[in-house]
Amino acid sequence: MKKAIAALSLGLAVWIGAQTAAEAKVYWNGSELKPGQIGRLTVLKTTELYQLQGEKKIVKRTLKPGEKFRIYTFKPGMLGLGGGYYIDRDNRVKYETPSKAKLNQVKIEQLFRGAKMGMTPSQIKKIETGKLVAHSNAQGVDLLIYSTSIFGYNTEIWYGFEKGKLTYFGYDFDPEVTYTEDQLLKMYNNLKQQLISIFGNSYQQSDSEEGYPPALTFEKNGFTITLSYDSSGLWIDIK
C-alpha cells in the first residue's frame, strides 16, 4: 500500500501551507499529559529553576510553593522540564509519575491521532495537528501528507482516501533526511519497543528483504499496524 500511494503522489503534489487543529488529549489527575512527559513536579518550598553550563548551575528564577511543572527527563539529583531547564530533586519538591496505562494511552493517541477509517479528507484536516505539506489525487486515490513527529522522531504522516473515505494512513520516517543504515536500524528497534509497550508481545513477524529486519504486524481495535524497514524506507502502516 505505501509504495502504491508513494508512486501516485509523484509529480502530482500541490504544496500548501500549515494547518493545525485540536487533537485528542489524555488527562492525569486533572491536567493534560503531554507526549514525552514522564512525571509532574509540585514545588513545596522555595527552590531554583536553572540551566546547566557544564557542571555549573545558572539560576533563571526562583520558584514558589504551589507551582507545578511537567517533567520530561532527569539527571542524577535533577528533574528536567525540557528546554534545558532543571530543578533539584530534593525535599523542596514533590515528584509524581503517571501509571504505565496512562503513558501508553498518550502513545496510542499519538499513533492514531483520532483518525478512523471511513473519515473524509475534511474530517482529517480538522483533527490533524501537523503541517500539511502536500495534497494529490490520481486514479481515484486522494492523498494528504503532513509533517509531524512521533516517539521523538520527525516524520511525515500519509493519509490515503478512496472514493472520499480514509482507507489507510502511515508514517514515513525517512522522507527527506538520509540516514545511515545503522541509524535506521536503531530507529527500527526503538519503534519496535514503542509498539510492543503499547500492544504487547503478541505480533506476527514476516520475512523482509535480504539484509533487513522482519516486518512486524500488530492487531488492535480493528486496526492492523505494521512496522517495516526495507529498501523503500522505514514505515509504520495502519489500515
Image (tube, grey):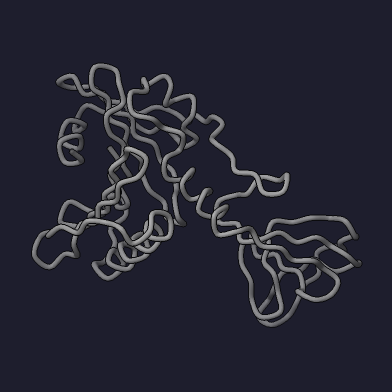
Q: Residue at left 79%, top 66%?
A: 94
| Left or right of 98 on screen, residue 142 | left
From what the image shows, is residue 187 above or below residue 9? below
Report the front residue among 13 and 190.
190
Figure disc tally: 0
Question: Is 58 left or right of 1, judged from the image as shown?
Answer: right
Residue 22's quadrant in the figure? Answer: top right
Rendered-image quadrant of the C terminus: top left
Hey, which quadrant is residue 200 in on the image?
bottom left
Q: Nearer the viewer, residue 146 or 94?
A: 94
Residue lying at the far left in this picture: please name it. 210
* Quadrant the N terminus occupies: top left
- Residue 8: % across, % down: 17, 30
Q: Is residue 166 left or right of residue 232?
A: right
Please indicate, yes or no, whether residue 175 appears anywhere in the rendered image.
no
Q: Which residue shows up at 23% across the image and 22% down it?
A: 162
- Residue 232: x %, y % from top left: 17, 51
* Residue 96: % across, % down: 71, 63
- The furthest residue to the top: 163
